[in-house]
Image (cartoon, coloured by chain):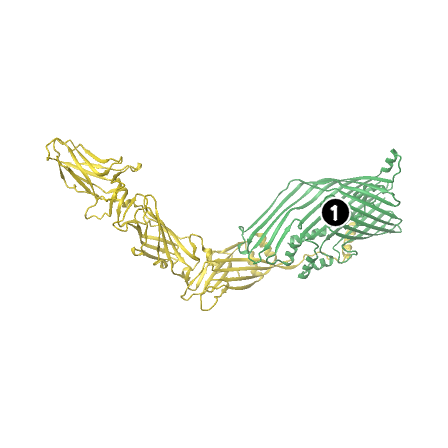
Chain colours: A green, B yellow
Amino acid sequence: MRRILLTIACIVLSATAFASTTIPGSALYSDSYLQRCEGVNALYWNPSRLFTNPKGCGDVILLSSQGSFWNNAMDIDLYNKMNGDSISLETRQEFLDDIDGNYFNSNGHFSGILVAWSKGRNAYSVGTHLYADAKISKEYFDLLLTGNDYGEDYHFTKENNDINVLGYGDLSISHGGYPLHELIGKHFDIEMPKVYIGFTLSALFGGVVAEMKEFEGNFSTSADSTALNLDQTIRFRYGSGGIGMKGLVGLSVEDLVENLSLGFTIDNLPGFIAWGATTKDKYYHISADSVNISEADADTIENEEETKDGETYTTEFPMIFNLGACYTWDDLSVSIDWKQSPEQSIVSSDKPFIALAGEYIIADLVPFRIGYSYDARYDAYSMTYGIGVHTPKFDIDYAIQTYEQIFPSGKAKGSGYSLQLRLKY
Amino acid sequence: MKVLRLTVFAAAITLIVLGCMQLPKEPEFDTTFKLPLINKHYYIHDLEDSTDFIVENDSIFYMQSGNISSYLVDSLLSIWAHSQLNQWAPVTTGVENVGYLALSQAGIDDDITISYALVKSWTMLIEVRNPHQNLESLQILFDDIYSPNGDQLQLAITELNDTTFVSLDGDEANGRFYRIGTMDNDTLIDSLKFTIVPEIVVPENEEVCEVRVFFQDRLFFQEMHGNIYNKRMFIENEIENIGIDYPDNLDSTLTISQARMHFNINNTLGYKVGIRGKMTGYNDSGEFRSIYIDENDNLIFDPSLTPGEAAFSTQTLTDSVAYLLNIFPTRIEFTDAYFIVGQSASEYGFAAAGDHAYGDFQGRVPFLFMLEEGLIRNDSTYVTELSDEVRDRIREFAKTASISLTVENTTPTAAHAYLYFSTIEHPDTLFHEPDSTFGAWNLLIPREGEDTYTPANTTKDFTFSLSEDDVRFFTNEKYYLGIEFLFDSTEGETIYIAPDDFLRLNGDLDIVLHFGD
């Protein structure tokens, strides 16, 4: 159980993102960023917007990072109550009561940009990404925190007990800001808005992958306290050392209506990491049928544990469609993004993700931001509040994020931060 | 480096702003798990195993079973035959020279008479002396003896100078034997008639030689019909080990009554057989007791009705059986014991080589006991083996525990149950020097009612608290649980223990696990 708790803690502390391509720049706006990205940040979001770089100019992002975590049960106050010392039974029960649904769900995301730069219509980046998602059934916590009673039957399934971890680095090249409207204008005598296109190609270097393949378990004691039944099967796959690629194409329409920018991207076109350097399949099974402790021995309790080399396999990144719009009026801008994938995976959701953001820049120097996002996958929302300092040579931006609360407070069920350092030349 | 510091600073500020989130520490709490510890029913009828313990008519018996078998009857199937002409007799022409070989002889109690027999071997001696000079040969014709080919036996003696021996061995390998009498004959043959015919040309009424005819040795039969009386067919002196693991101390705790012993015998002889002799029982304490079976016990078993087919019959011995079985013997031995064959001189029957009597015996003891106060130790101890992982978990997390036990007694007398825990299985250690600091536990289950020994159902609950040190005992890789029962004396009164009576131990372990530092 301690291992489980530590695993949860690591996952919770590792980071989160409801959006799959969250980077420090996008997290400043709750990931309402498709038509806000500029310069090198366009590489990850919408390469068509590399047109925002003035000719011969560019930017550099250094050692920027973003991280967030969320869970469906514990707010910060409760977390503090359960953190160390002796946890009272009331607190434990409060935690169980607060679990929304049949399982405790926690996920995190961390991304960092080691270095990224752009010049004109080209951009390059070296980044890292870690995704983690864990589910642990409420019954497990109930058993762990409050013990069991005779006659109770605990049933555990993969649906409620799951762990997925994916970590990789990317080396990306982007070319964008290509004025499609000019090309069309040369050949056709039609009026059209400014349309830019662009693409990003990323070489992916898989660092770590882990996924639950099978999880099935039962634990019960008979009502007359005479027998214990236990049956647990776990198949777990993990590996390291993979290589793959992903592609991103984007389109941006400017000034269709004055000050309105529209965009559309398809991410993961294609996207995959083939794992082969080290893969392991771990199998664990324990079962006992109608036994009591006085009968506990190798004949009554079957226990199997096996770890063997796994076969090469591929983690597919499902396509993600992203639509976004941004309206700018002087120092004020508002934006909206919608994102969805046909498939569910650790990096994608088949349920919509919607984000809204607003920014007001005072004296072209200090931007204030507020963002809102709703992820239907987890039926959870977050708010982001940010501030920055923009100068002609560099930008420093910072934002905090809070989940399930309008304003940061101890009742939030998650939090995040984003810090971006950007040099401009 | 400055940038990195700034990043860390930003993350820290975020956490502080978002509600003074504390740095994570390992949570600390106690959880109580309820686990079934033991559930043992010691039903009386659980003893039933169809061999040593059986249930009949709602009563349970334990049985000491063993096999019994006699030696083959072969050596008994023989008689002496004596010729009337074992004295020299003249053979005269012109008259019928008739003689008889008597199959019994006064003064020799042979105990067998036949109406028909297949003769496995015999040696007949025919001697001739003073033959007439013109005597060419003697023909001897036997009325009731037939050669293997079915013809009446006829011997021709042509060399008359010497004594003539005639050996008439049967062809055992091919099942061809000389016969006396015919199979359908039921008249006892007390002598074998023969006629001597001389071949000689001389006047009538002239003596031509002297002859005497007799058997030199016993006649051995392959098969016979007739009478056998009081022949002894000895029982093989085999020791029968009884495969019952009696609880320790049972012999000094219980006094049994109304025991009986069934003998189930297959008899291939066409004669009744009866058991006589000595049975001795030995127990593991070195005690032994013997009983003697004689004609008064009337253990007589049915004869076979068809040659080659065994008749099965059962007889019961009642006298002295309780005395024999009260020491709870683990082996029984027959000494100087035999089947007596032929229960009356007039019993007509049959027997053949290879016939014998065999079967088994079952001592049945109903569960009617007088209990003397004493311990009955359940012979089987219970071993629990815990995996390394489980033991590590106990070592790491287990704090304290309590054991709740419910003890139920449906026997008509009070009982105590003692539980011992040890890492050593040997009874001397387990029951007398248990490792654990908390065993032995004395669980008294009182009898309901003070004056009667009527069946009751008494339940009592016990709770024991285990300290942290006690709990550490369960980090041993393997430990043993031994159980002893002590029954109160019935003070000379015989009680009936029904098959459904039981002692039950049901217990659960409430173990407090501590998570965290």
Q: Is residue B469 visible?
A: yes
Q: Quadrant of the N terminus of chain A?
A: bottom right
Q: Amino acid at mark 1?
A: Lys
Number of numbered discs on residues: 1
The x, y position of residue A389, in whole percent, is 85, 51
Residue on which disc 1 sits: A351
Q: Quadrant of residue B104?
A: top left
Q: Which residue occupies the foreground of this view, B134 or A424?
A: B134
The x, y position of residue A49, in whole percent, is 83, 42
Relative to residue B89, is residue A17 depicted above or below?
below
Left or right: residue A5 compared with residue B381: right
The x, y position of residue A59, in whole percent, is 83, 44
Q: Is residue B161 visible?
A: no
Left or right: residue B441 compared with residue B191: right
The x, y position of residue B316, in whole percent, is 35, 55
Q: Which residue occupies the foreground of this view, B170 or B349?
A: B349
Crowding at mark 1 (Cα within 10 Å: few <14, some 14-19, many 20+):
some
Q: Quadrant of the C terminus of chain A?
A: top right
Secondary structure category for the residue under label 1:
loop
Callout 1: chain: A
Q: Residue furthest bottom?
A: B451
Q: Which residue occupies the foreground of this view, A379 or B145?
A: B145
Q: Which residue occupies the foreground of this view, B492 or B16?
A: B492
